[in-house]
Image: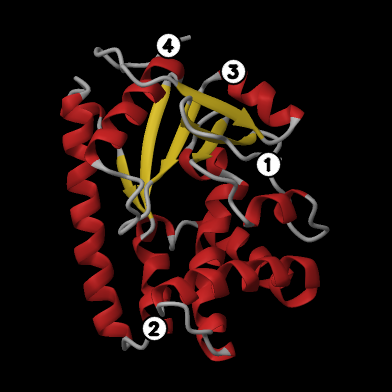
Amino acid sequence: MCGFSTTRTTTAFVMEPYTANCREICGRADHVLVGVSPGNGYFTEQRLTDLLTWAGSVFADVEAIVPDASLVHTYQALGSDEASAWKEARRQSRRTCRRISRAWAAGGVPERRQRIHLLSDFIDHPGYRRLRAEVDAALAQEPVFRQALFEATGRALSTRLHGAEPSLAQIEEGVRYLTSEVPLCMDAPGILGVPTSVNIYHQVLPTVPVMLGSQYLRVSPQQGFAVVRPAAETVGVL
């Protein structure tokens, strides 16, 4: 099965599934969801061109998602009020979407096939809302899940604070960045209406290992995860 790309990428990528089930879903290659974080220096236009071209050559269906709604919580954790946080999140997300579109165009993908979502597109989706309630319950009831998310948030905020330690209040606000994204990690097939889906990122997502082992979160068996990085770079996976 192949995708829609008309241009062969010159960059070889390595895909490392998290689990045996993930490997099976990767093998089906029905759909891939590419997460692109605004402000992340990894996602240069050339890197996106190579990555999206590669994804289109491997998967039948490729969609990108930009986490605008979750980014709001990071800005609020860093001191912005809600209105200012949304304004900056929208600005950064628009820039990122334009970069993705240029990358797709450079790879020969016609505009009608350039599917880019914002996380805010789904916040009122019934499936997303149901899963978000599960995530909030797990955060309250499962110490391992809570610890993993708090530690990841603390590290991310500390980087933005130039090495200073964030307060508990900042972490509690910032952790909503991750909890906002988890529902689409749990069941992208159900939310996007595809048979199976692989969520890819260039490093292990801190939420995924604990999510897969959680007693409170029901990850769809049609949902896969993989680390995808250029073959020339070291891939750190489970």
Residue in the picture at 39% in, 83% down: 78
For disc 3, the marked residue is 28
For disc 2, the marked residue is 78
Mark carried by residue 2: 4
Instruction: Give the secondary structure at mark 1.
Output: loop
Residue 216 can be seen in this image = yes
Instruction: Give the secondary structure at mark 3.
Output: helix
Viewer-side label of 1, 2: 2
Percent x, y for residue 123? 44, 62
Viewer-side label of 1, 3: 3
Residue in the picture at 73% in, 77% down: 140
Viewer-side label of 4, 1: 4
Q: Where 38 falls versus 170 (above or below)?
A: above
User: Which of 136/72 is in front?
Assistant: 72
Evaluate if marks 4 and 1 touch, with contact meaning CB atoms under 8 Å apart.
no
N-term mark: 1 or 2 = 2
Q: In which quarter of the image is the C terminus?
A: top right
Q: What distance separates the C-alpha of mark 4 from that of mark 2?
A: 43 Å
Amino acid beneath label 1: Ser
N-term mark: 1 or 3 = 3
Q: What distance separates the C-alpha of mark 1 from that of mark 3?
A: 16 Å
N-term mark: 4 or 2 = 4
For disc 1, the marked residue is 220
User: Which of 42/216 is in front?
Assistant: 42
N-term mark: 4 or 3 = 4
Residue 142 can be seen in this image = no
Instruction: Give the secondary structure at mark 4.
Output: loop
